[in-house]
Image: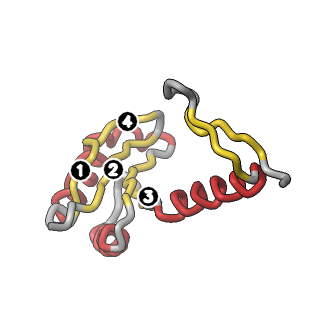
């Protein structure tokens, strides 16, 4: 009959077995795994880069982009990149990131407060849960 004896649950006492076509069984399992993977929600991470001396207009422009990304459901990683001797302006970078968080507090939650990592100071913003 070209069927196989397949062990379904080995932990049960006694073990559960079925007489089925093994190739079709494997095919169905792969198909179920693909469906589960397709239904899983994918998290998108967008990055926005600032300099320590970012101008007012540039800040507003980038804030508008961050707002759009968050409304679409993406996480935003905002960071200030310090080039060369600009590393002495760490406080300005932190103020800039906190100001961004304040501008977006109506639609976003700060996941991690600004912290330094090498020449970068970064902060993560995630969309607020919808009720």
Q: Nearer the viewer, residue 103 or 46?
A: 46
Disc 4 packing (10 Å; few <14; some 14–19; many ≥20): some
Q: Do the numbered discs 2 and 1 sit on residues whose CB atoms are within 8 Å? A: yes
The residue mark sitting in front, 2 or 3, is: 3
C-alpha span from label 2 to label 1: 6 Å
Q: Do the numbered discs 3 and 4 sit on residues whose CB atoms are within 8 Å? A: no
Label 4 or label 1, whichever comes before in sequence order: 1
> Which labelled disc corresponds to residue 110?
1
The residue mark sitting in front, 3 or 1, is: 3
> Which labelled disc corresponds to residue 43?
3
Label 2 or label 4, whichever comes before in sequence order: 4
Disc 3 packing (10 Å; few <14; some 14–19; many ≥20): few
C-alpha span from label 3 to label 1: 16 Å
Q: Which residue is mark 2?
A: 124
> Which labelled disc corresponds to residue 116?
4
Label 3 or label 4, whichever comes before in sequence order: 3
Q: Is residue 63 above or below residue 27?
A: below
């Amino acid at each position: 009959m070209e069927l196989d004896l397949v062990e379904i649950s080995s932990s049960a006492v006694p073990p559960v077995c079925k007489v089925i076509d093994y190739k079709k069984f494997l095919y169905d399992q792969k198909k179920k795994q693909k469906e589960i993977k397709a239904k899983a929600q994918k998290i998108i991470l967008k990055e926005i880069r600032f300099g320590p001396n970012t101008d007012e207009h540039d800040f507003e422009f980038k804030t508008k982009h961050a707002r759009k990304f968050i409304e679409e459901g993406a996480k935003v990683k905002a960071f200030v990149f310090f080039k060369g001797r600009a590393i002495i302006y760490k406080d300005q970078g932190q103020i800039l990131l906190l100001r961004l968080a304040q501008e977006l507090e109506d639609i976003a939650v700060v996941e991690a407060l600004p912290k330094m990592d090498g020449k970068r100071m970064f902060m993560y913003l995630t969309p607020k849960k919808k009720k």
